[in-house]
Structure formats: C-alpha cells, structure tokens
Image: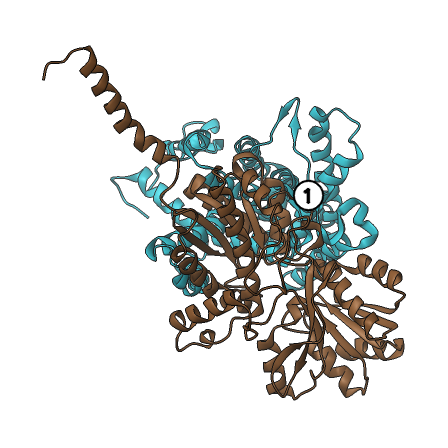
Amino acid sequence: MINGNLKADYGADERVLNNRNKQLFVYGSMLLLALFPLFADDYAVLMACKMGILLIAVVGINVLTGYTGLVSLGHGAFVAIGAYSTVIFSNLFSGLPAGILPIIVVPLAILVSALVGIIVGLPSLRVKGLYLAVATLAASFIVKFLIEQDLFAPWTGGIVGIDTPVPNLLGWELDTKREMYVLITALAVGTMLAAQNLFRTRVGRAFIAIRDRDYSAEILGISLLRYKLMSFAISAGYCGLSGALGAYFFARILPEQFGLDLSLELVAALIVGGMGRTLGPLFGVVVVLLVPEMIKITMSGATGGSLEWARYTAPLQEIVFGLLLVFFLLKEPLGINQITDRILRSANRWPFARG
Amino acid sequence: MTLNRRTFLATGAAATAVMGTPMILKAQPKEYVLGASLPLTGPFATAGQLVAPAFALAQKMFNDEGGIAGTPIRFVTEDSGYVPQNTLANYQRALATEGTALVGYFADSTGAMKLMAPELKGENARLMGSTSFASELADTATHPYQYVSGPTYQDQFDILMQNIKAAGGTKVAIIYSNTEFGRDPLEHGRATADRLGLEIVLEESTKAQGADIPTHVTKLAQSGAEHCILQGYVTGVWPQLIGGARQFGLPIQFHGTFWGMEKLIADRITAEAGPFLAGYQGVMPYRYFYDREGAPRYKQYAALSKAMFAGTPLENYMSTWALQAMCGLELAMKALRDTAEAGNELTADNVAESLSGIKDWDSGGFFGGPVSMNNNKIGTGRVYEYSPESKLFTPVSEWLST
C-alpha cells in the first residue's frame, strides 16, 4: 500500500495541509501573494484584483455546483446584486461615518444576494440538471432587466450605470488598486478557507450527500428543502461579496458587466479548475482570466505589436484559448486541480512509486 | 596637461554637461505611444476590423509629418472583444508598459469610456477619444480628459429635427434600441421637438438585435407619423424596419444618426433586398470619403490608402466608422502638437487644455468649415440621403450646427 502520510493521531488525520509539500505550496503561495504588490506594476495588480474578485464568485458557485451538485447559469445575477446593493446602501447610509460604512454595507449586500439566492433556488426542489440550469438562467436576465429599468434608475443608474464609492475601512481609504489588492486578496484567501472548512462540517457533508444522490440523502434524514436552499444562499452570498468588491474596485458599474457572459465565465472557470475541490476555482480563474491575457501579450510580442497583425491575431487568440480549454478538459476532465494533486502526490512520495 | 583649479572646473563642467545631457534628453521619450482598444472580435468585430487599418494609415501619415514636434509616434492596438473591462485592462497594461510615453488612448465604446472616466486621475490620466458620441461625455467638468469627435447624439437629434422642421414635418416617431446608445438622446429629443413645435407621436423601444419587426411597423403605421428617427442601431434592425414599413406601404420618411449611415451596409442591403432604402436620410458629422473636392486631408488619406491597401476593398473607400476614428486621432494629434509646440510637457492636463482650446480648426475636409471644440465636442453635421441607383449618400442640407 502506498502511503505518503503518516497519521499517528486524529489531529494529523483532520489536518487540511497534511504533508510538507502541501504546506510548502500553500504557504509559499501566500508569501508570494503578500510580496506581489511590492514588485508588480499597476497592470499586474489590476489583473490580480480581477482574479481575486472572480475567484470569490467561483468559490461560491463551487459550493452549489461542485459540492451540492446543483447547476446554475444565473450566478452573474448575484454578483450584480452584490455590486448594486453596495452602491445603493452606501448612498442610502451616506450620513453614517465613512469609516464604518463598508462594514455595514458589505454584509447587507451579501445578505440581499443570499435572500435572492434562496428565491432563485426554489426551482431546485422540483428540477435538477439541465432543467435547473435553464430555470436559473432566468435570474441572470431578470436582474439585469430590472437594473436597467428607468423606474429604478434613481438607485441603480439605469442603463448608463452608476459611479461607485471608495471604500473606507475605519479611516483607511482604499483609493488605489494596490490598497484594494490587500483587501481583495485577504478576502479571497479567507473565503477559500471558509469554503474548505464548510465541507468539514455537518452542513457541508449534507451538501455532498445531496450531490452524490439526493433521495438517498433524504432517506438519511437530510432535509432537501433546507440544505438545497442553504447551498443556494451561501453560494449567492459569496457571489454578493464578489460583486461588492467589484463595485469598490471599479470606479463605475454598468449593467452590461453582469450579463449571461459572466454567469458562463463562472461555470467555465469552475469546470476547468476542478469542481468540488478547494483549489479548483483558483486554477479555473487563472485559466479564464490570465491565459487569454498571456496569449495576447505573447502574440503582441511575437508580432512586435504590429497593427496589421493585430487584426488577425485577435480572433486567433480566441481560437487558441478555446483549443486550450478543450485540451485541458480532454487531458484532465476532473480539472487542473487533479493535475496539481498528482504533482503534489508524486512529490510527497518521491523517490517511491508515483501516481 | 597639469590639473589646476581652472582646468579642474572646466573638466568638471564639461563632464557634468556630458553626463547631464542624456538625463535631460531622457525626459522626452524617443517615441510617443497612442494606445487603442478595438472590437476586433465579438459583436462589433465587423466595425473593428474595418477601423483597424485606419490606425496603420494614421501612424504612417503622422510620422511622415514629423510626429509630435519631431518625435515619432507609435500605435499600440489591442482587441477588447467589445467588453468595457477588457478595454480598461488594455489601458492599464499600456500605462504600465509605456509609462509617460503613452500620451493618448482611443477606447471602443461608451461603456468603456464611462468605466474609465473615474480612473483618469493623476499619473493615470491620459487624453482619451473613442467611438462614442454619448452626450454624457461632452462635459469638461466631469470628463476633462475625454472628448467626442463630432456632435453628440443629442446634437444629431437636434440637427435632424431642425431639418424635419425645415421640410415642413410636424409628426415624428422615434424608434430606438433598448440600449444606452438607443436611449441617449431621448429626453433631449423630446425637449427639442417641443421647442420646434414638432409632435412626437410614437416612442418605440426595440431589441438591439432580432427585433420583432412586424409589431413595431404596425405601431408605426397606427401612429400617423410623417417622419421616423431611428437611433441606436449599427448593422441590423434599422434596414429591416424600413423594409417592413415599405412592404406595409407606409410613406414615412426615415432618418438615422451616425452609426446607421454607413454606405457599405446600405449597399449590401440594396444588393440583397432591393432598393427600399431610397430616400433614407440621416445625419453625418463628416463628409463621406468619396466627397473629396475641397478636402485636402481626405485626398491625403486616399493616396495613402491606395498605396497601403492596394488590392483590398479599402483601397478606394474609407468607411464612416474609420473616418470617425481618424477624426478622433486628428483632434488628439492637434492637441498634442499644440501642447508640444507651446513648449509644455505632454501631461494629460496640458493636452486636455489644448484640446478644449481648439478654435476655428481647419480639419482639411471632415467638416464643412473651420470648427471649434465646445465642451469637448464639435456640434456640427449635415443631413444626407441615400440613393440605391448611385449607391451614394448625398447631402440634402447645409452644414447645421447646434
């Protein structure tokens, strides 16, 4: 029997980072994240922040799709609700001291998203799979439609969008991208840890039971109504937080930022990264956001930024990105997380058997 | 040579001059960069692909003229896929890689302009033109670094309504796409109609693509409108609406704004569906490319197009979309050159000041006569009419200003 980890007590068995290589990987990554703003330029910081914001939303959809087995194509709507709630509540409570506003506004935005998540999740009690995907699709359209309406324009800015406030955390005004990076990274790491721990609890195990066979779970005493809606609420709450950070990060939010594309991007990132895995969303976000940029930079470098070539390389970038996605899925249908798992496992067992 | 106090000081001064000179020269980059995001993929890829060659032409032409006060320029053009956040990322990357050499940027949508407007602060500010004619952008107080290369949609509505009034029209319908682009001039249009004594008998919103044409045409027929203004469309919906109305036998006079005035689209519709666009009118801020009499700048473009794009459809015709980009670039270059010639640094503030101070500018043919920047826009345009026989848009009004 191949066993890379010696577990001599229950504490060791329960440990998340249960071997040296995992510890090295995670702590090393965290150190790198901490040092990143010291040497990165503004563009790199912008990309890192965008990744952090998207990561939180993908962690959210991972709770629902990866762990509970419920498909949603409407999660872009919850990101929108989080973003718009942040702006609306900030304007509504503008009389309060600026330093405490985000502490009130962000939890409220998460709460509103979670409540809407429960409503959108109601069809999950009757339908699942593709049917549920179509049912949730409506959320994406309805929320965007409502945001764009003139009736709500005094609060949402309507179709022309609305300027967002600068967050102020107890007197610390986060008015640069580098400062926002600190907040976004801290919350992104925090939400990933929270998601990891959620599945070590009774609630998380209930989600996994529902994913693996919902009627078996019900027979075991798990209330489908309660846990499916709870999964929707948690998942939507994560997306709400992502939206709130997006609102703080971008100087203006527009309804077109929250279309169907965003919902699909979230699902695509999750599938590519690895569903039902803690680090899956992270790898997915890297592929979905960073790879197209890297292809763009590489091609631009290869053609010397030529205007003539840009016309041909731009569509080519889309094709290369599409082919890369297909390659990843063919090579590893369980997502990139599975590949890194294999690498870490073989590192742990080296020089003995790999696999 | 013995080293005494005098030679020491002289050597020191010479050394300082030699070592100091490169530092002074370093302050001015060896080339200036103008960035651009274009929708080379995505829903407006057709327009983006047609506009892209204009940047190559502009780079050659401006550099042949000596760039900016002798310093050559280079364009960095990237795809945005028509996603505002991508345009923002492209802009940030251009800022990070080019630094102070980046002196201007061209964005590809109203959304991108609005998303980036609050980001243009301090060291991150640059002069910014775009494809947009959104009225909100023409405001030096709120958007000091952004400008509109012509009249805003509100101005274009004013020009159309003035023309309708002059033609004796009284009842006007407005059909618009349910987008920001479509809705932009609505409120202002109502006020203008009211001021001119025109009655708006129908305001109909449609989808931007795949609109339910028979329903909209039926409503138009019921409204009793004599004139109908179409707003917020580029390649689709507007031709179908006109076709539907003609099939219905409606004698309504249709009018469009800039993005619905491309000859290539009108020609294609005529070739595919017949001559039903006969009499279609619309406002164009610029001359068409084939109208080169008394337009020396257009003649220059034509000569360069012939040399650079030989064997392609771009050899003889520059689309209205590309002309709009060219006009934006001409304005940016004028502001940059004026700033450099005045001996000022090319900071966003200095360049924006030069831009808003442009007075009686001879554009070389874009506009009817000398024009001035007023609130970072040029409020002038002319009404054109399409003829399926000649396949040309020809002017039916004088140059009208707002």
| Residue B352 rendering spot, x and y as whole percentages | 58, 43
Considering depth in this image, is B283 or B168 the residue closer to the camera?
B168
The location of residue A121, given as percent across then percent down, is: 72, 52
The residue that mark 1 highlights is A83
Q: Is residue A14 visible?
A: yes
Residues B218 and A193: in front is: B218
Q: Mark 1 Cα within 10 Å, few/some/many (few <14, many 20+)?
A: many
- A231 vs B197, left or right, is left
Residue B172 quadrant: bottom right
- The correct choice, above or below, for B285 with respect to A339 in the image is below
Q: Position of residue B278 (x, y in %)?
A: 70, 84
Q: Does the image show residue A75?
A: no
Residue A123 location in percent, x, y?
Answer: 74, 57
Taking A100 as reference, is A333 left or right?
left
Spot the brown chain and give its letter.
Answer: B
Secondary structure found at label 1: helix
Chain coloured cyan: which letter?
A
| Quarter of the figure that contains the N terminus of chain A | top left
Q: Residue at x 50, y 63 (%)?
A: B40
Question: Which residue is the extreme one toward the left?
Answer: B1
Q: Amino acid at mark 1?
A: Ala
- Which scheme is used to colour this image of the protein? by chain
Image quarter for residue A52?
top right
Query: Which image quadrant is residue A100 in?
Result: top right
Task: Using the image as rendered, state which of residue B166 and residue A161 is in the foreground.
Answer: B166
